[in-house]
Image (cartoon, grey):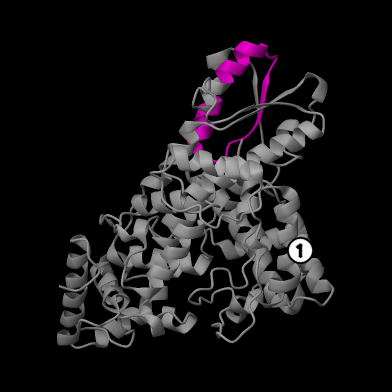
């Protein structure tokens, strides 16, 4: 499959190239079940074609169906049907799918084609579904921090015997520095499209012109070799300060100290555990500090493994949860980037241009805004799945619905990640460039995040008032006089009414 571009994938481990057909396909159903960003489709199709060439060079018999092949059946099942008719195989071997929708499809192939189907675990992850379920069984709270510590012990990463190196498991409190504009920024490597990628880009513009985003400036790596070059660049130039500034945001700076490796990890071009060991080696060699390396490793063996476990544990109905009963449609500017809010314009603009934004832009700008206005979490989930190059449902859904929108009621996160404009001002230079004033809570020039934050707390008090991590914000709300509360609620209502009318300006 398109997110399994790995030479050591489990479906090939005991295969004999002499009597094996490797089937790969670009199909309309997978490209359009949501309106994927153009750059996401181009990245995957080009990476798939390059991977097919690599397999052929290693002696494998690869049959590859391109999207514009006249005989393309348009779906995984349709292409399997054509292949079964051609070859009458003894069995179909596949590495397990990454999402429920495709898993159900694959599980139906045995009966449909009367051929044994060998579905194998995806060994690119450290835990199987059963192992994660075993970890979760009997726990009152499934917090990522406790899972992460178990994964550190399991892998031995950054461990000194049974204790964490540095005496602490988590250095997150040291990883929240704002970035000044005078600091020298590392730069990721740009990969100009080769002839095969340019061909794919033309295909995408022809067949997916109505999809969001742009292919202007497309520069993703599409081979393991180039992805490895990006790894080396990150480890040497960005990792040393990644810890300090991983939560920072700056206008016009799309990457800062982030690795931009998640698309390659999630598509199979890079091995996640190998990356963690390389980061650990940078610490041991004295080239990167512990807070940077720990923070990076936590994102991979902690958060990445954890959200995948939650996705499969909770089942296909997880997507329907809506704890806060949020129903507002997502504003149109999520697809255009046209808004007066500078922070949103920056995060949305780079997302539409590149299909990428880092985790704080996703969580505390676009996600925070959706949470504060009461956007429907299923619609927010769909947008994140469509718009980001590294988004697959197993990783995107728990992050969006659980962590960002609190729609699972606290299964994944201990509190909603709601914040006023003060947080964005502290971690970025966005507010200094905005037409709204982050210091004002009411009035025509007030930052919308401010009144929306208090309105969010007030309207959701019945469900959130007992949350211990929100005790202080609710005490602050209770200390306000009634006139102030009314003014804030009125300000929020005015903005939301304007939003519903298709504007971000107050009426």
Residue 193 pos. (x, y %): 63, 50
In-image side of 115 versus 250 (left or right): right
In-image side of 464 versus 160 (left or right): left
Number of residues whose C-alpha sits closer than 10 Å to that of mark 1, classed few (under 14), some (14–19) or many (20 or more):
some
Q: Quadrant of residue 184?
A: bottom right
The residue identified by callout 1 is 232
**How many numbered badges does the structure rendering display?**
1
Residue 493 pos. (x, y %): 18, 70
In-image side of 63 versus 356 (left or right): right
Q: Quadrant of the C terminus?
A: bottom left
Residue 484 pos. (x, y %): 19, 86
Q: Secondary structure at mark 1?
A: helix
Residue 482 pos. (x, y %): 16, 85
Residue stretch in magenta: 80-108
Tell which of 236 and 308 is nearer to you. Answer: 236
Tell which of 17 and 339 is nearer to you. Answer: 339
Relative to 257, say whether 133 is above or below. Answer: above
Tell which of 220 and 99 is nearer to you. Answer: 220
Q: Residue at x 67, y 46 (%)?
A: 268
Q: Quadrant of the N terminus?
A: top right
In-image side of 41 versus 425 (left or right): right
Q: Residue at x 21, y 80 (%)?
A: 488
């Amino acid at each position: 499959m398109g997110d399994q571009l790995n030479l050591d994938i489990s479906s090939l481990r005991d295969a004999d190239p002499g009597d094996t057909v490797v089937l790969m396909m670009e199909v309309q159903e997978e490209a359009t079940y949501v309106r994927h960003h153009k750059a996401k489709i181009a990245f995957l199709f080009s990476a798939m074609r390059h991977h097919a060439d690599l397999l052929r060079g290693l002696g494998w018999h690869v049959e590859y169906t391109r999207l514009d092949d006249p005989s393309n059946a348009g779906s995984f099942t349709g292409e399997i049907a054509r292949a079964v008719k051609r070859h009458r195989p003894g069995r179909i071997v596949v590495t397990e799918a990454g999402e429920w929708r495709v898993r159900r499809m694959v599980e139906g192939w045995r009966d449909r084609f009367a051929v044994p189907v060998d579905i194998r675990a995806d060994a690119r992850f450290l835990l199987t579904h059963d192992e994660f379920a075993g970890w979760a069984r009997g726990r009152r709270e499934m917090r990522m921090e406790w899972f992460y510590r178990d994964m550190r012990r399991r892998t031995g990463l950054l461990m000194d015997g049974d204790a964490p190196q540095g005496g602490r498991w988590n250095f997150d409190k040291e990883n929240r520095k704002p970035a000044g504009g005078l600091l020298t920024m590392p730069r990721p490597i740009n990969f100009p499209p080769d002839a095969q990628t340019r061909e794919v880009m033309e295909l995408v513009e022809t067949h997916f012109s109505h999809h969001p985003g742009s292919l202007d400036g497309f520069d993703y790596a599409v081979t393991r070799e180039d992805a490895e070059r990006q790894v080396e660049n990150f480890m040497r130039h960005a990792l040393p300060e990644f810890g300090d500034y991983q939560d920072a945001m700056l206008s016009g700076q799309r990457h800062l100290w982030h690795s931009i490796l998640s698309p390659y990890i999630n598509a199979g071009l890079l091995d996640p555990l190998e990356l963690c060991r390389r980061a650990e080696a940078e610490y041991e060699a004295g080239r990167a500090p512990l807070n940077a390396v720990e923070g990076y490793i936590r994102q991979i063996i902690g958060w990445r493994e954890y959200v995948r476990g939650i996705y499969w544990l909770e089942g296909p109905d997880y997507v329907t949860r809506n704890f806060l009963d949020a129903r507002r449609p997502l504003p149109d500017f999520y697809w255009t980037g046209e808004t007066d809010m500078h922070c949103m314009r920056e995060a949305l603009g780079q997302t539409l241009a590149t299909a990428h934004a880092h985790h704080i832009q996703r969580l505390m700008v676009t996600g925070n805004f959706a949470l504060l206005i009461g956007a429907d979490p299923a619609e927010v989930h769909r947008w994140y799945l469509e718009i980001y190059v590294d988004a697959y449902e197993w990783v995107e859904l728990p992050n969006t619905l659980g962590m960002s929108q609190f729609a699972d009621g606290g299964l994944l996160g201990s509190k909603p990640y709601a914040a006023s404009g003060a947080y964005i001002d502290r971690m970025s230079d966005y507010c200094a460039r905005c037409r709204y004033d982050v210091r004002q809570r009411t009035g025509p020039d007030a930052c919308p995040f401010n009144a929306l934050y208090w309105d969010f707390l007030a309207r959701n008090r019945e469900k959130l008032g007992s949350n211990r991590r929100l005790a202080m914000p609710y005490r602050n709300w209770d200390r306000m006089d009634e006139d102030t509360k009314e003014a804030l609620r009125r300000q929020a209502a005015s903005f939301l009414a304007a939003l519903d009318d298709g504007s971000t300006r107050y009426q």
